[in-house]
Image (cartoon, rainbow, N blue to C red):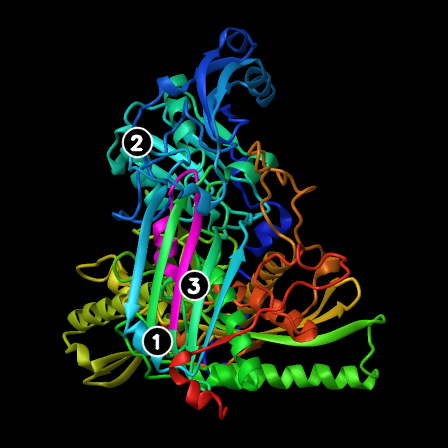
Amino acid sequence: MSKYRVVGNSHPGLSVAEIATGRGRYTDDWKLPGMVYGMILRSPFAHAIVKSIDTSEAESVPGVLKILLPWDVPSKRYNCSGNPPSPLLIQDEPILTDHPLHMGDRIAAVAATSRKACREALMQLKVEYEELKPVFDVMKALEKDAPLLHPEIGGSNLVKTMEAAEGNINTGFEESDYIFEEIYETPAIQNVSLEPNGCICDASVPGKMTVISTSQTPFQERRILADLMGLSENNVRIIKPFMGGGFGERQQLHSQPVAALLSRATGRPVKIIHSREEQMTASVVRHSTRIRMKMGVAKEGLIRAMQVEAWYNTGAYATHGPIVVAAGSRKTNYRIPHYEFKGHCVYTNGPVSGAVRGYGNPQITFARESMLNMVAQKLGMDPIALRLKNHVQTGDRLPGTDHPLLSCAVNSCVEKGETLRKAIEEEDMKNNGQQGLSHPEKKAWGVAFCCHTSGPSNREGMSSSIVMVNDDGSVNLLMGSADIGQGSETVLAQIAAEGLGIGLEEISVTAADTATTPYDTGTFASSQTYVGGNAVALAVEDVKKKMIQRLSEIRKLPPSDITFENGRFTVSGPEGLEHLTLKDATKQITFGAGGSIIAGSSSYKAVEAPPPFAVCWAQVAVDMKTLSVRLLNIIEAVDVGNPVNPEKVKAQVHGGVSMGVGYAMMEEIQVDQRTGKQISSDLLHYQTPLSRDMPGIHVCLAEGWEPSGPFGAKSVGELATVPVAAAITNAIAQATGTAITRIPITDAFRPAASPWPKRAATESPAVTSEKEGV
């Protein structure tokens, strides 16, 4: 039972009725007067030169209004990521190109009065290509004779190397009794959002532009489009409609620059909606990685050193690449005195990588948590005990950060999760341990720990909010943050309602419209509850302070004689105490002498971005003959501080676990290494988990409180996905006795006569005398 009236209670959502009844308008539901349609011709080759384009037959298609070719558009290159400006964001992407660098690269665009006419015109465009040698593997891309993808930027396909270090790595390994070393590989995967990318751009009025688009970062989109179109930001308006999922994918611009140029050329609004095939081949994917990890451990189980070198496949364009690499360098929740990280972001002719839920964390966590299981096995320690022995706690400092942790409820996570795991085991024992099993299957549990963040760094993470009190005491909440389906508008409205002592039904939200709402960095880095919530909480305090000041002026009393609590003001005047509701006070301020508007505002920067923590257990059944794997149960216990809306937290965990299951078990962007053609270009060939593939999912909310968060809250959005793959593969390793070093597991777990080769830890020669007695 929550100690608050609104916060801590599970409201289904402010927009749930609109979504459930179909009244919520998604991008493709919008229709503007005079609107026409746009489509993009995409390269069928991973690497080529466009020699010529014959448009004559395409131009004769009835309804065609405009065809844009690479030489018709500004040559200025940009970075499509919706991040704030940074020297790490390489400006390498053209709007249209005559030198396609991946299958799906944009070659030409058509505007027509119907989608049918657009499709016909694209079919009639005659393009002469010269195929070039492609490169898809990051290690081959770094070889001297590899095709150079961006000669205008540098002399190699290395985008950037990011490094981080603490302590002395050599000292750490010298202090270690055991040294473990392994190479891990993770795949590129799709976001597979329900709604495909789309936008409507209206640049029909000279010098102005309005864009309706699936965007997680409307203010960053405004900045990028204004720059590309030669407009000032006040003349560009971005409106975010209802959105069918974000998952990081909507942080990038997709077809907006093309639609903007088509609209300017035709003088009419232009709508572009991706097909599912475009979504699969031309939207960003998670960075595939190759991670070499080396860990030094003392015989009592303390981690002394960790050294990581990783290669990230960013595909044809850099987008978020260097920042994803940098983010991965600090994603650890353990005390590690000696640490060294070197990450290489590499161009290839593969699909473009970008922001995907977890932002570099699932890759590193898979490697680290897999290695910790090897450590536990070698030392004969319980995997959970080993992790807790090294885990940060309240007051500790995470590696690479300056702020001590104000909260860490990982012990509560373990307690709640283990209680539930034992209950599942007991229920299984009642069924003689054979429930759902077929001979010769073997059951096992695996575990993984992780942390994430509650917003981006202090340099770039900011949210703003305005709270306007109407004369009837109801409230309009204006905020720049974008609800991408996770329910942030509801959560932030709950924070406002709690602070003002009113019901949630008395708050109306306007969000993510650059013409009417205040600035927000964007919906990424799990920032909404913590960063956006703090902005709302501070705006509420600001409006209360202003109302107290105005009431004191009206009544000629010092502000200290007026207080606010539980939705009403208490005035200590000469005639005793007087109580005013929010409505009564508002009327006095608005309609009294010297009446004024009642509005509070505030901005908040993510100075600390306190990490939430998670512990994940996975139970599998492995057929020891065929090595086929079934998922039975997943438990995820999360420390998100004090949950503002517990059921929405659980829903986020369910969704995050589902994404993690696909990452571990089956999902992978597959590219023909000879032609560059993407094999998994539709949902028939790209495997995602179906309902029959999903295990029982059990969510535990730890008992936590974050002092710097709004009503004690931290984030959850990305956290839930991060540990799942490692927990699953650790369970498989427990069942089979063999560590898993690559996901998805489909390659390793095919029917075979013998399992994959075993890997062993190496022991440090610096302490051989001690090891003889271990």
Q: CA distance from mark 1 to mark 2?
A: 50 Å
Report whether residue 1 is seen. no
Question: Looking at the image, is 180 positioned above or below residue 456?
Answer: below
Q: CA distance from mark 2 to mark 3?
A: 35 Å
Q: Secondary structure at mark 2?
A: helix
In the rendering, at what x and y percent does residue 122 appear? Answer: 55, 18
Identify which amino acid the numbered label 3 is placed on: Ala
Question: Looking at the image, is 65 positioned above or below residue 342?
Answer: above
* Residue neighbourhood size for the residue with mark 3, other residues' Cα within 10 Å, grouped as few (<14), some (14–19), many (≥20): many
Q: CA distance from mark 3 to mark 1?
A: 19 Å
**Magenta-highlighted residues:** 306-328
In the rendering, at what x and y percent does residue 2 appear? Answer: 50, 81
In the rendering, at what x and y percent does residue 680 appear? Answer: 63, 41
Q: Is residue 221 left or right of residue 694?
A: left
Please tell me which of labels 2 and 3 falls first in the chain. Answer: 2
Tell whether label 1 touches label 3 (CB within 8 Å).
Answer: no
Label placed on residue 568: 1
Indicate whether residue 227 is drawn in magenta.
no
Q: Which residue is mark 3?
A: 493
Please tell me which residue is depicted at 47% across the width and 42% down the height of the picture: 214
Indicate whether residue 318 is drawn in magenta.
yes
Identify which amino acid the numbered label 1 is placed on: Arg
Mark in front: 2 vs 3: 2
Label placed on residue 228: 2
Question: Looking at the image, is 59 positioned above or below residue 260?
Answer: above
Q: Secondary structure at mark 3?
A: helix
